[in-house]
Amino acid sequence: MTQEEQNQLTPDRVVEMLKEGNQRFVSGTLTARDHSRQVRAAAVGQFPKAIVLSCVDSRVPVEDVFDRGIGDMFVARVAGNFENTDILGSMEFATKVSGAKVVLVLGHYDCGAVKGAIDGVELGNITDMVANIRAAADHLASYEGEKTSKNEEFVRMVTEENVRKTIGDIREGSPILREMEDQGRIKIMGAVYDMASGAVHVLDD
């Protein structure tokens, strides 16, 4: 993609492209790509369409999930897909500096980090890591079912709440991103990946 092509894209069009790519992923009709050629073409510069904040889970191959090639998107990964200063800076670079149109927080069902946060796991640096997700579980205090990782319904609810919380934290933590969104220059959104089907479900804000 050239800078001119990137400039012509709207955030809504990028969202549609991501949805269309995921449909191809689910149906098994991924685009055939010459990665060697793409590597050479991308060497002169990058003009990605989006930045995706994903979990580190090895079962979520982000570029494949959206049928995107080399140079198409930025991908940031951290277990539990939560934001921090480094992630916010990366998102600001991706959008304000490099022109990406969409900031997508991508959680996934059956997330080990979410389960660890629910159960209050304590192990080395994992303890502090899952603390970033714990607030999503605490926000569901009115839930009347079993609040453990054995309850699939509760895990799914916390997974989705964690994505929504991260979106809120992004807007609060980055005036740059918030202003760009208010101006319609970018879209900040959330979705959850279904391990069983490969489908990405966009969440309401």
Image: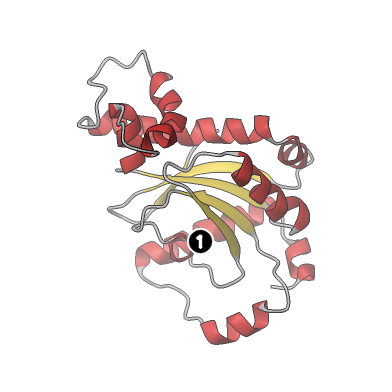
> Does residue 13 sit above or below 153 in this rendering?
below
Counting from the top left corner in percent of width and height, residue 25 is at 40, 65
Residue 107 relative to residue 76: left or right:
left
Residue 130 relative to residue 146: left or right:
right
Name the residue nearer the viewer: 137 or 4: 137
Name the residue nearer the viewer: 158 or 197: 158
> Does residue 19 sit above or below 5 in this rendering?
above
* Circle 1 residue: 20
Residue 155 relative to residue 101: left or right:
left
SS label for mark 1 = helix
* Residue at the spot 62% in from the left edge and 56% down from the top edge: 50
> Does residue 84 sit above or below 103 in this rendering?
above
Counting from the top left corner in percent of width and height, residue 192 is at 42, 44
Task: Tell me where residue 152 sits by quadrant.
Answer: top left
Tell me the amino acid under the disc marked 1. Answer: Glu
Task: Tell me where residue 88 sits by quadrant.
Answer: top right
> Does residue 40 sit above or below 63 in this rendering?
below
* Residue at the spot 59% in from the left edge and 30% down from the top edge: 168
Taking the view exactly as shown, the residue that stands out farthest to the left is 150
Colour scheme in the image? secondary structure
Residue 34 seen in the current view: no
Taking the view exactly as shown, the residue that stands out farthest to the front is 124
Counting from the top left corner in percent of width and height, residue 90 is at 65, 50
**Which image quarter holds the N terminus?**
bottom right
Name the residue nearer the viewer: 115 or 62: 115
Counting from the top left corner in percent of width and height, residue 187 is at 66, 45
Q: Residues within 10 Å of mark 1 (few under 14, many from 20)?
A: few
* Residue at the spot 51% in from the left edge and 33% down from the top edge: 164
